[in-house]
Amino acid sequence: MAAIVHETTHIEGLESLVQLVVGRRVAVLTGAGVSTDSGIPDYRGQGASKRTPMNISDFLNSELARKRYWAGAHVGWKSFSQAEPNQGHLAIAAMEQGGIIEGVISQNVDGLHRRAGNSHVVDLHGSLDRVICLECSQQFDRVSIEQQLSDENPWLEELSNIVLAPDGDVDVSNFNEVTIPACTVCGGILKPDVVFFGEFVPAKIFAAAQSLVKRADALIVAGSSLAVNSAVRLVDQARREKMPIAIINKGVTKGDRKAAVKLDGGTSPILTALAHELGSGYLYEDIE
């Protein structure tokens, strides 16, 4: 694992966050704000794209919508897949390895928590590196699907000046020319193994998230505005079980009034400082 760089700067509210965590088993719920320092934008933060993400109804009922999705997803995949874990991801992994964090429930689809070193991750909304057939349930590695898209649509490789979205998508104007891949087993519709807008989180996945919260004594929400119902339900679960909740986010969230501690700021410096204060310093290079 790469070393975490810790800068000794004052962070308002850090002491309260440390006190909330000390002696407790912690679950962490992360949102898009955790990955912005890796170059992946969020949906609602400052400078976020105003584009509309793919809706499951459109994807299922319109071949043109599927062409639009796969064209943009293919163009954005190279940048998305090359994103690296940032200091916030590494700090969360260090705290899991140090026995401070029980595990991570992530609303992100980038897989960066696992790449940072976390072993217990619930991907609430799935992961873009997997593709599934909606007819026969066959699973494919995303790399093989990307190769098909490249072979059948070489002109997509020439597009530049792309604006990446949080789900790895990009707006492509002439998507009606795209040839989209089909399942090599049954010829069915292929879809990335993620929850589109309008879909429900699979019951087994949400149950795993609830179980992680149940085993914890405290919940940290990092980089999420809590605009999605599944995330709010997990926060409400923690509140019902009378566990303290900490929120780390730039700007207001829907859970602020439920939090014992709220730190308004970037997740990377705050999580890095928290891990350092809690004694995960063997993974750090201190800069005075």
Image (cartoon, rainbow, N blue to C red):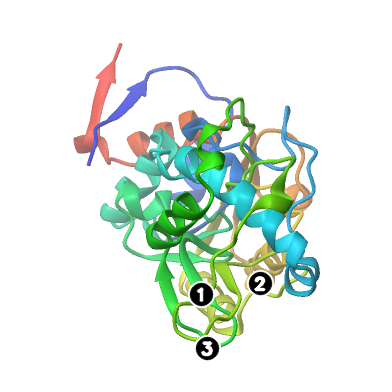
- Residue 56's place in the image compared with 15, above or below, is below
- Identify the amino acid type marked 3: Cys
The answer to whether mark 3 and mark 1 are in CB contact below 8 A is: no
Q: Is residue 115 left or right of residue 27?
A: left
Mark 1 and mark 2: Cα distance apart in space: 31 Å
What label does residue 237 carry, if any?
Answer: 2
- Identify the amino acid type marked 2: Gln
Residue marked by disc 3 = 136
- Identify the amino acid type marked 1: Ile
Asked whether 57 or 223 is in front, the reply is 57
Seen at 39% across and 34% down, the residue is: 87
The answer to whether mark 1 and mark 2 are in CB contact below 8 A is: no
Q: Is residue 83 left or right of residue 229?
A: left
Mark 2 and mark 3: Cα distance apart in space: 35 Å
- Residue 173's place in the image compared with 187, above or below, is above
Asked whether 285 or 217 is in front, the reply is 285
Q: Is residue 180 left or right of residue 227?
A: left
Residue marked by disc 1 = 132
> From this viewpoint, is residue 117 visible?
yes
> From this viewpoint, is residue 167 visible?
no
Q: Of callouts 2 and 3, which one flags the residue occurring earlier in the amino acid sequence? A: 3
Q: Is residue 21 left or right of residue 68?
A: left
Residue 143 is situated, as x and y percent measured from the top left of the image, at 38, 57
Which quadrant of the view contains residue 189? bottom right
Residue 186 is situated, as x and y percent measured from the top left of the image, at 51, 86
Residue 127 is situated, as x and y percent measured from the top left of the image, at 49, 62
The local secondary structure at tag 3 comes to: loop
The local secondary structure at tag 2 comes to: helix
Query: Viewer-nearest of labels 1 and 2?
Result: 1
Q: Of callouts 1 and 2, which one flags the residue occurring earlier in the amino acid sequence? A: 1
